[in-house]
Image (cartoon, rainbow, N blue to C red):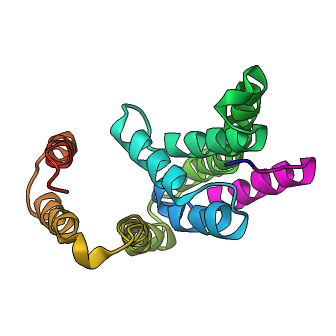
Amino acid sequence: MTISLQFADWVALFTHFVSLSLLAVGGAITVAPDIHRYLVEEQQWLTNAQFSASIALAQGAPGPNVMFIALMGWNVGLNAAGGIGAGTSAIGSALWGVFVTMFGILLPSATLTFVATQWAHKNRELRAIKAFKAGMAPNVMALLIATGWLLTGQHDNPSQEWPLWAVTAVTTLVVWRTQTHLLILLAIGALLGGAGFI
């Protein structure tokens, strides 16, 4: 995929991630539906496959889950340079995409978190602080459900992919009802995928 990005497009990408940073209450993964809307549907800077692969790679790799933002920036930069075959200019463009997206997603939320946490810690007995903490849990859950719905809906014919839906349902129940480590569930999913069941 090859796209053309001007300076104004890079600024728009940065400002979009800045605005998402302040909405990512449960982590960056909770804003994945809006990132999909912006990068895949509206701007068409990424394909569905690149979007899903970025999330899958970042979630499977060790480290913070925000790394999928870096992979999306990398892919936007590669697409803007004409792909990996463009040589060192493609690598430079991809690294620029990583910088733009990661700086955009991290700067506002890190600054706000630092300031707000200090204030909330000093005032932790206030009724408003307790109510805010209690009210955030349903919001985070709704954002995570929206992300899961988006990722499971990326398939051409869901009615023929019932094994994927079954694995999703079973995994949801196991996570909800047991203390099974997520890496074990990822390994089981990888084995089922490698064996051709899903």
Does any portion of residue 111 appear in the rendered image?
yes
In the displayed image of the protein, which residue is found farthest to the left? 178
Q: Quadrant of the C terminus?
A: bottom left
Q: Verify whether residue 9 appears in magenta.
A: yes
Q: At x 12% / y 64%, what residue is drawn?
A: 170
Q: Verify whether residue 124 appears in magenta.
A: no
Quadrant in which residue 65 is drawn = top left
Left or right: 96 in relation to 198: right
Tell which of 148 and 181 is nearer to you. Answer: 148
Query: In this rendering, is residue 153 above or below 92?
Result: below
Q: At x 44% / y 38%, what residue is drawn?
A: 64
Where is residue 94 drawn, in percent x and y?
Answer: 69, 34
Which segment did they paint magenta? 3-23
Left or right: 131 in relation to 87: left
Does any portion of residue 22 appear in the rendered image?
no
Quadrant in which residue 145 is drawn = bottom left
Where is residue 152 drawn, in percent x and y?
Answer: 35, 67
Where is residue 116 drawn, in percent x and y?
Answer: 60, 53
In the displayed image of the protein, which residue is found farthest to the right? 7
Where is residue 127 drawn, in percent x and y?
Answer: 46, 73
Query: In this rendering, is residue 195 above or below 149?
Result: above
- Secondary structure mainly formed by the magenta segment: helix
In the displayed image of the protein, which residue is found farthest to the bottom? 159
In the displayed image of the protein, which residue is found farthest to the top? 88
